Image: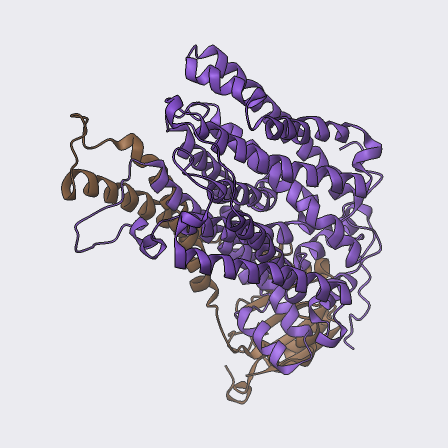
C-alpha cells in the first residue's frame, strides 16, 4: 500500500441498478480485489456469491445457543427436582422427564434466538458508531434508500487510486467517490 | 390464489424511492403536522391507559378482593383477558415467520405492523397473571434462581411452563421484530432532518450501513429466527391450554385443547390485525402497499382457522357426551341452557355463523363488512375464553359450592384499561416507527420488475 493513500479509506462506486452492481462486483473479484464491500438498500440476490463471501457461520451460533439452552434447561429441572428439592409424590419417579420437555423446548428456542442475534452483532461488528463510508455525501443520501454501491478499500494490495478509479468507471459506475478515512 | 393476477400485492409503478418516501414520511412528520385524527385517537387511548394506572393502583392498595372472583370461580376476568391478549399476540409471529417460510410475498407489507401488535398484546397479557396474584410483589418467585429458602418453582406444573413460554415468546418476538426494523431505522436516520431525531434513529439503527457482508449474515439469521419462531408460536398457546387441560374441572379436562387453543389464537389474532389494519390503511393512504389482496388473503385465513375453531366446539361437545362422565355431561348441557347460555350462544354466533359470510367474495372484498366481521370475531373469542374459564369453574363437582361470577367495576376498568394501553402503544408505534417494512418492499419492487421485465426507474442514479 502506498503511503499517500492512508487518508483514504477507499473508493465508492455507485451503480444504476442491482444487476449492474452484481456484475461489477463479479468483475472486481475476478480482477483480484478482495477487500471490498457492496452496499445495497435491500439484500440483493447473487451479491454474496459475486463478492465471494463464505457461507455465513451464524447457523452454528444458533445451533450452539439451542444446544446450550436445551441442556441447561433440562439439567436445571433435573437438578431441582431430583437433587436439590426432591418431593415424594405417591412414590412417583423423581426424574419425571416428560414434564420437563416444555421448559426444555422454550429455553432451547430462547437461547438459540439469542445465539443468533449475539452472533449477528459479533459477525457484523454492530453497533458501530462510526464508519468511513458515511463520509461520502451521496452515500448518506442514497445508501439506505435507493443507491447500489461497490466499495473497494485502500488496504487491498491491488488498490491504486487512479487505476482503481478507472477500473470502477469502466464497470459502468455512475459516480465514483473517495471515502475519507 | 385465484385473483393473484388481478390484484397485485403492491400497486405497480412504485420505485425504491417512492416507497421509501411514502412510508418513512409518516413517522418523520413534524409534531405540529400530526393529523388531528391521530391526536384524538391517541388522547382517547391514553385516557384508557390512565384508567389502567388508576385501577391497578386501587388493586395494589386493596388486593384482589376488589374483583368479582369468588370460590369456586377464582379465575375471572384476569385470566380471561390474559388468554384473550395472548391469543391476539399470535398473528404477528404467524404472519412474519410461518408465511415467510412458505414464501408468501404478501406478508411483506403487513408483517412489521402485525409483529408490533403481537408485542403490545403479549405485554398486556403478561400484566394479568401478575395483577391476579394476591401478592404481586412476589411475582419473581416464578423465576428459578438460587434463593435462601432453598425453593424451586414446580417444574411439573403447566403454570410454570406458561411463565417460560410467555417470556420466551415475548423475548424472541422482540428480537425478531427489532432485527427486522434495524435496516429501516437506518433509512429513517438518513432521511431525518432534525438533529435529535436523527441521533435517536441513529442510535437505534446500531450503525447499520446496508453492507452486503452484513446482509449476508442477516438473511441467514433472519430465516433461522423464523424457523425458530414457528414451533414457538404453536407451543405458546398449547402450553396456555394445558393450564386448563391439566386440571380436572369439567369442561377443561380435554385433549382437544392444545390444537383448539392454537387455532383460536390465530383466529383472534387475524381478526385483530384486520380490525387495526383496515382503518390504518385508510387513514394513512397505504392502499398501494396494503392492497385488497392482503385483506382478502387474511379474510381467507380467518375463515379457515374459524372452521378449525368450529370443529373444536363440535369436538368439545362431542367428548363431553362421549366421556360418559356425569359432570362433563352436565357441564356441556349447562353451556347451552345455564346461566351463561346467552354468552355461549353469542360466541357460537360470532365465531361460527358470522365468519361464514367470508365465503362470499362480495363481502370479503368489502372493507367495512370485513371490519365488522373482525369485530365480531374479537368479541366472540373473548366470550369463548369467558365461557371456558368462568362457566366451567362456576359449576364444579359439589353443587353446594356452585357459585356464579359477575365482574366488578374494577374487572371492567382493568380490561378497558389494557385496551387503552394497547391502542396507545399502537398509536405511538405508527407515529414514530415505519409501520411497513421498507427494505422488504424494495425487494418486492425489484422482484416485480424482474418478473415483468421492466427496470425500476432510479430517478437520481447520478446523485442529486
Residue A129 is at least partly visible in this image = yes
Judge by depth and name the residue closer to the eye, B26 or B221: B26
Image spot of residue B22 (x, y percent): 77, 63
> What color scheme is it?
by chain
Q: Quadrant of residue A96?
A: top left
Does B247 appear above or below A3?
above
Residue A27 is at least partly visible in this image = no
Q: Residue at (80%, 43%) from the top-left corner?
A: B368
Does B144 appear above or below A31?
above
> Is A83 left, or right, of A176 in this rendering?
left
Image spot of residue A99 (x, y percent): 30, 33
Judge by depth and name the residue closer to the eye, A40 or B283: B283
Q: Residue at (34%, 42%) from the top-left corner?
A: B160
Does B241 appear above or below B219?
above
Residue farthest front in this picture: B400
Residue farthest bottom in this picture: A4
Instruction: Give the letter of the brown chain.
Output: A
Q: In the rendered image, which quarter contains the C terminus of chain B? A: bottom right
Does B357 appear above or below B143?
above
> Is B164 left, or right, of A166 in this rendering?
left
Q: Residue at (40%, 25%) from the top-left corner?
A: B396
Image spot of residue B448 (x, y percent): 77, 49
Judge by depth and name the residue closer to the eye, A171 or B179: B179
- In the rendered image of the structure, the colour used to display chain B is purple
Total tally of numbered discs in the picture: 0
Q: In the rendered image, which quarter contains the N terminus of chain B? A: top right
> Is B309 left, or right, of B83 in this rendering?
right
Image spot of residue B253 (x, y percent): 41, 24
Q: Quadrant of residue B351?
A: top right
Amino acid at each position: 500500500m502506498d503511503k499517500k493513500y492512508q487518508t483514504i479509506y477507499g473508493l465508492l462506486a455507485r451503480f444504476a441498478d442491482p444487476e449492474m452492481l452484481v456484475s461489477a462486483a463479479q468483475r472486481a473479484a475476478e480482477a483480484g480485489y478482495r477487500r471490498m464491500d457492496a452496499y445495497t438498500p435491500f439484500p440483493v440476490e447473487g451479491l454474496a456469491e459475486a463478492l465471494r463471501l463464505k457461507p455465513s457461520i451464524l447457523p452454528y451460533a444458533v445451533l450452539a445457543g439451542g444446544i446450550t439452552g436445551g441442556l441447561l434447561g433440562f439439567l436445571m429441572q433435573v437438578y431441582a427436582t431430583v437433587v436439590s428439592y426432591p418431593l415424594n409424590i405417591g412414590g412417583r419417579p423423581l426424574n419425571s422427564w416428560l414434564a420437563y420437555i416444555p421448559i426444555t423446548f422454550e429455553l432451547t428456542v430462547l437461547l438459540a434466538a439469542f445465539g443468533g442475534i449475539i452472533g449477528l452483532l459479533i459477525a457484523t461488528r454492530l453497533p458501530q458508531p462510526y464508519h468511513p463510508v458515511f463520509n461520502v455525501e451521496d452515500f448518506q443520501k442514497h445508501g439506505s434508500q435507493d443507491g447500489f454501491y461497490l466499495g473497494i478499500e485502500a488496504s487491498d494490495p491491488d488498490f491504486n487510486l487512479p487505476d482503481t478509479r478507472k477500473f470502477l468507471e469502466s464497470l459502468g459506475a455512475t459516480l465514483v467517490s473517495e471515502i475519507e478515512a | 390464489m385465484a385473483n393473484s393476477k388481478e390484484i397485485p400485492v403492491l400497486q405497480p409503478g412504485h420505485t425504491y424511492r417512492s416507497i421509501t418516501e411514502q412510508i418513512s414520511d409518516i413517522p418523520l412528520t413534524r409534531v405540529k403536522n400530526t393529523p388531528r385524527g391521530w391526536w384524538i385517537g391517541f388522547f382517547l387511548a391514553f385516557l384508557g391507559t390512565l384508567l389502567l394506572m388508576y385501577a391497578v393502583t386501587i388493586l395494589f392498595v386493596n388486593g384482589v378482593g376488589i374483583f368479582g372472583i369468588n370460590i369456586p370461580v377464582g379465575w375471572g376476568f384476569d385470566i380471561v383477558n390474559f388468554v384473550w391478549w395472548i391469543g391476539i399476540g399470535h398473528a404477528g409471529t404467524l404472519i412474519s415467520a410461518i408465511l415467510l417460510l412458505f414464501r408468501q410475498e404478501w406478508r411483506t407489507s403487513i408483517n412489521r405492523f402485525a409483529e408490533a401488535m403481537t408485542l403490545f398484546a403479549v405485554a398486556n397479557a403478561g400484566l394479568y397473571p401478575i395483577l391476579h396474584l394476591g401478592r404481586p410483589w412476589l411475582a419473581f418467585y416464578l423465576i428459578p434462581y438460587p434463593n435462601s429458602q432453598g425453593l424451586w418453582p414446580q417444574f411439573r406444573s403447566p403454570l410454570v411452563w406458561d411463565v417460560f413460554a410467555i417470556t420466551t415468546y415475548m423475548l424472541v418476538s422482540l428480537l425478531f421484530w427489532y432485527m427486522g426494523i434495524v435496516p429501516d431505522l437506518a433509512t429513517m436516520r438518513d432521511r431525518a432532518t432534525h438533529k435529535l431525531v436523527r441521533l435517536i434513529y441513529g442510535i437505534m439503527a446500531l450503525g447499520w450501513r446496508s453492507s452486503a457482508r452484513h446482509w449476508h449474515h442477516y438473511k441467514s439469521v433472519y430465516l433461522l429466527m423464523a424457523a425458530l419462531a414457528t414451533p414457538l408460536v404453536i407451543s405458546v398457546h398449547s402450553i396456555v391450554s394445558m393450564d386448563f387441560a391439566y386440571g380436572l374441572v369439567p369442561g377443561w379436562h380435554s385433549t382437544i385443547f392444545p390444537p383448539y387453543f392454537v387455532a383460536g389464537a390465530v383466529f383472534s389474532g387475524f381478526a385483530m390485525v384486520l380490525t387495526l389494519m383496515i382503518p390504518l390503511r385508510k387513514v394513512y393512504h397505504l392502499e398501494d402497499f396494503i392492497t385488497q389482496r392482503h385483506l382478502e388473503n387474511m379474510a381467507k385465513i380467518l375463515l379457515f382457522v374459524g372452521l378449525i375453531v368450529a370443529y373444536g366446539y363440535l369436538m368439545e361437545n362431542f367428548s363431553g357426551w362421549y366421556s360418559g362422565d356425569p359432570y362433563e355431561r352436565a357441564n356441556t348441557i349447562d353451556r347451552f341452557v345455564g346461566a351463561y347460555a346467552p354468552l355461549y350462544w353469542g360466541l357460537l354466533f360470532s365465531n361460527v355463523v358470522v365468519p361464514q359470510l367470508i365465503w362470499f367474495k362480495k363481502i370479503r372484498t368489502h372493507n367495512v363488512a370485513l371490519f365488522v366481521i373482525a369485530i365480531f370475531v374479537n368479541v366472540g373469542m373473548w366470550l369463548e375464553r369467558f365461557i371456558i374459564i368462568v362457566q366451567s369453574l362456576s359449576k364444579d363437582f359439589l353443587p353446594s359450592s356452585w357459585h356464579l361470577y359477575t365482574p366488578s367495576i374494577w374487572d371492567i376498568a382493568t380490561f378497558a384499561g389494557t385496551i387503552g394501553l394497547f391502542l396507545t402503544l399502537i398509536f405511538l408505534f405508527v407515529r414514530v416507527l415505519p409501520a411497513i417494512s421498507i427494505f422488504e418492499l424494495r425487494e418486492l419492487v425489484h422482484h416485480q420488475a424482474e418478473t415483468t421485465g421492466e427496470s425500476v426507474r432510479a430517478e437520481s442514479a447520478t446523485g442529486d
